[in-house]
Image: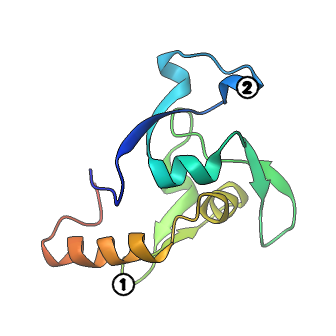
Amino acid sequence: MYATESFSVDHIIPRMLGGETKMDNLAYACLGCNGFKSSRTEAVDPATNDSVSLFNPRRQKWEAHFTWSTDLTEILGKTSTGRATIIALKLNRQNLINMRRLLLLIEQHPPE
């Protein structure tokens, strides 16, 4: 797994909102994504303006909510949760797109 920043352990449901430090509430996240998420569990879907839950990697399948752009450098949302998560965590920020381009060159992207 590659990231532009170090990985940290993220509480999916933040401790300040009652989330516990248990395996089913923890996930690896790069420091950038974790910082953008902060203590949020919801974000606004830009297509509907509805507030929806952020993607939960412990309970949801990536493929159900996201797909790759045709050039494989940007993550696209397939659902309200996917779209809101992309915006909230800034999953298509320029340094991530640049890293994906480099990983494509060495056949390490997209992840399986």
Q: Is residue 86 above or below residue 7?
A: below
Could you tell me the amino acid type at mark 1? Asp
Residue 96 has which mark?
Answer: none
CA separation, marks 2 and 1?
A: 39 Å
The residue located at (12%, 72%) in the rendering is 106
Q: In the image, residue 49 lies at what x, y percent?
A: 87, 66
Would you identify the image quadrant in which residue 21 lies?
A: top right
Q: In the image, residue 3 lies at what x, y percent?
A: 33, 56
In the rendered image, which residue does mark 1 sit on? 71
Question: Is 2 on the left-hand or right-hand side of 69?
Answer: left
The residue located at (70%, 60%) in the rendering is 84
The residue located at (51%, 71%) in the rendering is 92
Could you tell me the amino acid type at mark 2? Met
- The mark lying in front, picked from 2 and 1, is 2
- Circle nearer the N terminus (2, 1): 2
Q: In the image, residue 65 lies at what x, y percent?
A: 58, 56
Residue 16 has which mark?
Answer: 2
Q: Is residue 50 above or below residue 10?
A: below
Q: Residue furthest left?
A: 106
Q: In the image, residue 17 lies at what x, y percent?
A: 76, 26
Question: Is 80 on the left-hand or right-hand side of 2?
Answer: right
The residue located at (37%, 43%) in the rendering is 7
Number of dots carrying numbers? 2
Q: Residue furthest bottom?
A: 71
Residue 39 or 57: which is nearer the viewer? Answer: 39
Would you identify the image quadrant in which residue 2 lies?
A: bottom left
Residue 41 or 65: which is nearer the viewer? Answer: 41
Would you identify the image quadrant in which residue 112 lies?
A: bottom left
Residue 95 or 26: which is nearer the viewer? Answer: 95
Which element type, helix, strand or loop, lies under badge 2? helix
Classify 10 Å Cα crowding around label 2: few (below 14), some (14-19), many (20 and above): few
